[in-house]
Amino acid sequence: RRETTTVILNSLKFNLVGAALTILLGLGAALILSEKIKGFRFIRGTMLMPWVMPGVIVAGVWKWMLNSNSGIINQLLVDIGILNEGFAWLGNINTALFSVNAAIIWRLFPIFALVMIAGIHGIDEQLYESARIDGANKWQEIWFITLPGIKNQILTMSVLCLIWISNNLVLVNVMTDGGPIYYSSTLPLFIYKLGIQFGNLSQASAATMI
């Protein structure tokens, strides 16, 4: 019972934190990259790489980067003085789940941003020109023109991102296998283990209804 409760809470945290940060980072990146600045076209062109990479490759890369001994993230944090030694991000009950969250956010926010950029470029430029004539600053343009102009794209992509994060099995399975113990286990992994590994199809079917 305790494991089931923890898995449900893990899933809620994983889904909500992942979706919220994906939306915020995606919107921020879209607002920056929608400007006509030299070199940003190349950046936009390479942003799809995390999205098109197979999930197992993404999981393997992040698992290596978070390795306590040879991971580049720990090495960087030690070099700049934040850590004294490597930290087991995937082996700590307080950080394992959010470490997987970081990987899925990294994978999803570029596709979110690219859809937002396309929406921003579809807004009539005359609206911005009229706003500037009326004395609107950049933040007012974003708040009163850009965000309302892409609200449908924001809603659609937010729902899709939440679905993708909720259904994700590969990243959790490869990076932590639900550990340590079951503190990074989410419902898809829990159902997979019940039904496939342990052959308990009745409980797996019941868990699927959640």
Image (cartoon, rainbow, N blue to C red):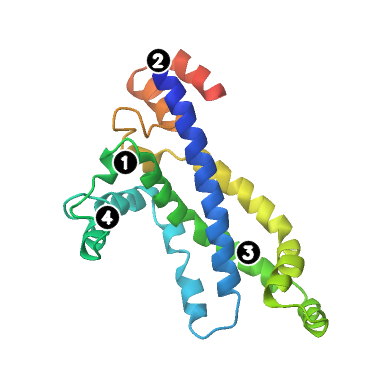
Label located before the other in sequence (2 or 4): 4
Quadrant of the image for the N terminus?
top left
Element on which disc 4 rests: helix
The reply to whether callout 4 and callout 3 are in contact (CB within 8 Å) is no
- Which numbered mark, 2 or 3, is in the foreground of this view? 3
Left or right: 143 with respect to 185? right
Q: Which residue is mark 3?
A: 116
Label located before the other in sequence (2 or 3): 3
Whole-percent x, y for residue 86 in the image: 20, 51
Q: Which residue is mark 4?
A: 65
- Figure check: 133 above or below 156: below
- Going by the numbered disc 2, the residue's amino acid type is Asn
Category of crowding for the residue at label 4, using alpha-carbon neighbours closer than 10 angstroms: few (below 14), some (14–19), many (at least 20)? some
- Going by the numbered disc 3, the residue's amino acid type is Met
Q: CA distance from mark 4 to mark 1?
A: 14 Å
Whole-percent x, y for residue 91 in the image: 26, 39
Q: Which residue is mark 2?
A: 200
Q: CA distance from mark 1 to mark 2?
A: 22 Å
